[in-house]
């Protein structure tokens, strides 16, 4: 989201607050703001072209998510994501992704399944050519389709949030050989959904997250969170 998007006239204050919140959260998760760094309302408001009010409201929401700590009479400080948080997120995601794949067996549409197949095919194409940026985008798209296919807005919202929390480390993982392996696992999940085999789909989606986490450990990719 560019600054111009935030500066445009917005009559719905909740929409504006949402934009500010997601922008600051993205900046924390992608490493723009470091752990223990103070977030200044005025400076962020000027950068985003908004008043201090939506920034202050966004801070409160970020504190509820555990990404910042507001210390009275001092300021707001980044707490970010730690190694234990990453582990917790992946263990929780493994269960939720399994449930999502199970429900997708019942609810996926013909159009969603066709798009999922196309995403996997394109990922195979780019993996063979070492196009890691495209691989990361297609990985994101596969999971987005899967989340939407479960037909539960509550589960979809939870999974999209967890997905965004680990964006930095996921990008590094997919730039390694894990990207091609991950796509093969996606293909097996899709085939189980296509076969309408909820037990198999759930098991494969669950293991997919565990494999991703174990790969991060093997590659030493969690050191950035220590």
Image: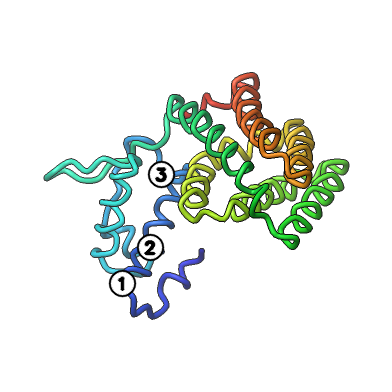
* Residue under the point 82% across and 51% down: 122
Q: CA distance from mark 1 to mark 2?
A: 8 Å
Left or right of 196: which side holds 31?
left
Q: Residues within 10 Å of mark 2 (few under 14, many from 20)?
A: some
Nearer mark to the viewer, of 2 and 3: 2
87 vs 59: above or below: above
Q: Which residue is mark 1?
A: 13
Q: CA distance from mark 2 to mark 3?
A: 19 Å
Instruction: Give SS at disc 3.
Output: loop
35 vs 190: above or below: above
Give x and y (percent) for residue 142: 69, 49
Give x and y (percent) for residue 92: 49, 32
C-beta proximity under 8 Å, tags 1 and 2: no
Q: Residues within 10 Å of mark 3 (few under 14, many from 20)?
A: some
Which residue appears farthest toward the left when viewing the image?
A: 73
Res 196 quadrant in image: top right
* Residue under the point 46% across and 25% down: 83
Left or right of 178: which side holds 214?
left
Left or right of 74: which side holds 11?
right
Give x and y (percent) for residue 115: 76, 58
Left or right of 84: which side holds 12?
left
Q: Which residue is mark 3?
A: 33
Q: CA distance from mark 3 to mark 1?
A: 25 Å
Q: Which residue is mark 2?
A: 18
* Residue under the point 46% across and 67% down: 3
> Along the polypeptide, which appears first: circle 3 or circle 1?
1
């Amino acid at each position: 989201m560019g600054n111009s998007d935030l500066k445009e006239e917005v009559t719905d204050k909740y929409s504006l607050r949402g934009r500010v919140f997601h922008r600051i959260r993205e900046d924390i998760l992608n490493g723009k703001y470091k752990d223990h760094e103070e977030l200044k309302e005025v400076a962020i408001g000027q950068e985003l072209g908004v008043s201090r009010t939506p920034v202050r409201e966004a801070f409160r929401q970020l504190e509820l998510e555990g990404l910042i700590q507001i210390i009275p009479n001092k300021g707001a400080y980044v707490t970010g994501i730690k190694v234990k948080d990453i582990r917790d997120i992946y263990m929780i995601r493994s269960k939720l992704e399994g449930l999502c794949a199970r429900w997708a067996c019942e609810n996926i549409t013909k159009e969603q399944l066709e798009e999922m197949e196309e995403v996997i095919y394109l990922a195979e194409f780019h993996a063979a050519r070492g196009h890691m940026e495209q691989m990361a985008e297609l990985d994101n798209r596969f999971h987005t389709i899967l989340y939407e296919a479960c037909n539960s807005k509550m589960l979809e919202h939870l999974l999209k949030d967890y997905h965004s929390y680990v964006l930095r480390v996921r990008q590094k993982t997919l730039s390694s050989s894990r990207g091609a392996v991950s796509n093969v696992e996606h293909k097996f999940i899709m085939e189980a959904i296509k076969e309408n085999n909820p037990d198999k789909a759930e098991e494969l989606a669950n293991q997919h997250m565990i494999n991703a986490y174990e790969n991060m450990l093997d590659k030493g990719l969690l050191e950035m969170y220590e």
